[in-house]
Image (cartoon, helix red, strand yellow):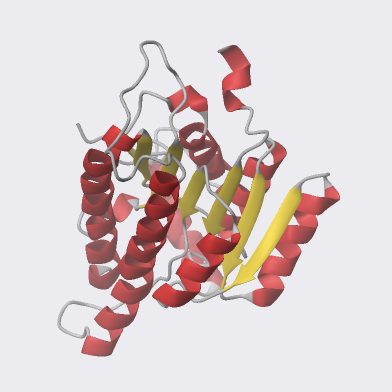
């Protein structure tokens, strides 16, 4: 296939969390690779900015202002795409509290966005992808020997927080760990339908979500992380977007159920 494996011309992508950070960078890159990108987020202004970036370079963007915790909104947006090849479920929020200080409403909100929102997106996208085969009543079709292209790619966003316990990140870490198990389970169930499912688990990335501390504290945190990284730097949204592009493309046609870790080497699990 060569470099043409990364060509997404003629494909349709659906990206949640597209109003900023990793979601925006991923939407922009998928569009640059040729996909028609449906950008979804609760932040209408941020969505418009992302769409403007895509259209400004000749790409095609469609926006959907929605709350991923509302299944009906997700279902409606997915249905309006007319068919999906790629889904990147990136929408997420951050919450900090110790185990002893965590309230029911804290846990409920983080699980609603970071796990249920991903679950709803994956469920609706998977149904659409399976339906597009036209064989849902007969079961999955047999694969042709040597066939390289899958029928769809679903990409979830996990986190480096699943690889090590971090004080204050109980709600976030638990939700992201659930996303990892969702990814593996769904990959097992959708493989026979030629739909791949993988997760990206970034290390520390400079985004509006991680830039939530006072300037001095933020610099201290990043300085510590830079010392821990063999590459001696923290990530940028574009670093993660390239992992999303790889998993969306035919270049990863033999990859499913995997957790990609673009983290600068801070964690190196087996």
Q: Give the quarter of the figure containing the C terminus.
A: top left
Residue 88 in the image: state x and y as whole percent.
48, 51
Residue at image x 20%, y 85%? Answer: 101
- Residue 148 sits above or below residue 193 on the image: above
Residue at image x 56%, y 70%? Answer: 215
Depth check, front residue: 66 or 11:
11
Instruction: Using residue 228 as the reference point, say whether residue 102 is left or right of it.
Output: left
Can residue 257 be seen here? The reply is: no
Residue 269 in the image: state x and y as whole percent.
22, 36
Instruction: Using residue 10 as the reference point, say whether residue 233 is left or right of it.
Output: left
Can residue 149 be seen here? The reply is: yes
Instruction: Using residue 142 as the reference point, say whether residue 208 is left or right of it.
Output: right
- Residue 73 sits above or below residue 240 on the image: below
Residue 253 in the image: state x and y as whole percent.
42, 25
Snapshot quadrant of residue 97: bottom left
Residue 123 in the image: state x and y as whole percent.
35, 58
């Amino acid at each position: 296939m060569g470099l043409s494996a990364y060509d997404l011309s003629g494909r349709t992508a659906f990206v949640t969390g597209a109003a900023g950070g990793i979601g925006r960078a991923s939407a922009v890159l998928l569009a640059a690779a040729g996909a028609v990108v449906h950008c979804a987020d609760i932040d209408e202004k941020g969505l418009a900015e992302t769409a403007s970036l895509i259209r400004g370079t000749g790409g095609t963007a469609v926006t959907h202002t929605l709350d991923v915790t509302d299944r009906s909104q997700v279902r409606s947006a997915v249905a309006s795409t007319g068919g999906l090849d790629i889904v990147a479920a990136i929408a997420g929020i951050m919450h900090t509290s110790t185990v002893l200080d965590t309230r029911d409403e804290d846990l409920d909100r983080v699980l609603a966005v970071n796990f249920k929102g991903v679950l709803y997106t994956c469920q609706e996208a998977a149904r659409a992808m399976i339906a597009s085969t036209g064989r849902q009543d007969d079961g999955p079709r047999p694969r042709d020997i040597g066939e390289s292209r899958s029928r769809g790619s679903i990409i979830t966003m996990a986190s480096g927080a699943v690889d090590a316990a971090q004080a204050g990140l109980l709600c976030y870490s638990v939700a992201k760990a659930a996303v990892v198990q969702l990814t593996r389970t769904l990959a097992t169930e959708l493989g026979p339908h030629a739909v791949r499912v993988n997760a990206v688990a970034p290390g520390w990335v400079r985004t509006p979500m991680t830039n939530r501390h006072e300037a001095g504290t933020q610099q201290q945190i990043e300085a510590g992380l830079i010392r821990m990284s063999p590459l001696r730097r923290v990530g940028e949204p574009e670093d993660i977007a390239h992992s999303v592009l790889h998993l969306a493309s035919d270049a990863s046609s033999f990859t499913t159920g995997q957790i990609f870790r673009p983290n600068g080497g801070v964690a190196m699990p087996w």
